[in-house]
Image: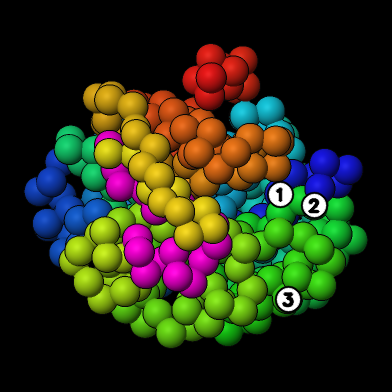
Amino acid sequence: MSEKKYNVFGVGNALVDTLAQVEDQLVTDLSLNKGGMALMDAENQAGVLSSLEQQSLQLASGGSAANTMVAIAQSGGNGVYCGKVAGDPNGEFYKKDMEEAGILFPVAAASAEALPTGTCVVLTTPDAERTMCTHLGVSTTLQKSDLNLDLLAQSQCSYIEGYLWDAEAPRAACIEALQQSNKLGVKAAFTFSDAFLLGRYADDFRGIVNDYCDIVFCNADEAKQFFGSDDLQHCIAEMAKISDSAFITDGPAGCHVIENGQTTLVEGFAVNAIDTNGAGDAFAGATLFGLTNGMSATQSAKWGNYFASRVVQQIGARINENLKDKISSIVS
């Protein structure tokens, strides 16, 4: 795998994030499920934005898998990202932002006349919980033909986000990416993305894990939803039966690493979290960097835990610096 040009080929929604710090009352007033992700049309999302007129807002290129790809680059790695944007100002901002972060973004922009670039309003409350209001826009038109198979073949690993499952064309693109990964000898990684998806697609995801996946990423809540149990240890044991390699994050406690039937808890780092937005994405990116750069699964998870601990200490899903100089001291 070390002879491949790219560490990871990511596939996911391409969304421009609008970040805001708010009080709990605003989340309640907007009838949002605190800590969750709500899909909205443009009109409803505009209503959320109108309630933030007095807030200081920050823009960033986002999407779960995109954040993961940036974490790979900030660890010292590289990658390719496949997501759909429109030829509008948000789409231009997104492409420029990703490429400046060090990630190749080869997908051609769609006409802005049909659908706009997807956007996500991220509301962070004082307890560090983030509530997301997402208008997927043109990202729902991502399709098989957008996948550059030559670049996929040059990658050590693919990484597919479960958020794509809600629309037919992106779902087909996901399956294609996984199937082609298997054919091309590229390791395939899949993230469950959010517990709400498992309420609808648990059977689909179980098929994906069984048929295509080499590596699974999820958090404790997602694992419990997936296996229909509140007993995390039971869920870890069940995951070990269906996946040779899995990483189940459990907040400050760290990560349960499953490798060939064996389970190890890699402890987290004690920090003062102010925003959990992007923590899981950052963990996956740093861990994938480790796995594609000669680290063991537990070493990779330790680097992932550290990277995620840095992300939750600031506002936004991405840190503003490269951390590669810290790898040796953290992993050793």
Q: Is residue 80 part of the magenta span, yes or no?
A: no
* Magenta segment: 236-252
* SS state under label 2: strand
Please say if the residues under marks 1 and 2 sit with CB atoms less than 8 Å apart.
yes
Q: Is residue 248 part of the magenta span, yes or no?
A: yes
* Chain-order first, disc 1 or disc 3: 1
Q: Mark 3 belongs to which amino acid?
A: Gln
* SS state under label 3: helix
* Chain-order first, disc 1 or disc 2: 1
Q: With respect to residue 271, does 102 lie above or below?
A: below
Residue positioned 48% across, 72% down in the render: 242
| Badge count | 3
- Around disc 1, counting alpha carbons within 10 Å, would you say few (fewer than 14), some (14 to 19), or many (20 or more)? many
Residue hosting label 3: 179
Q: Which mark is residue 155?
A: 2
Residue hosting label 1: 8
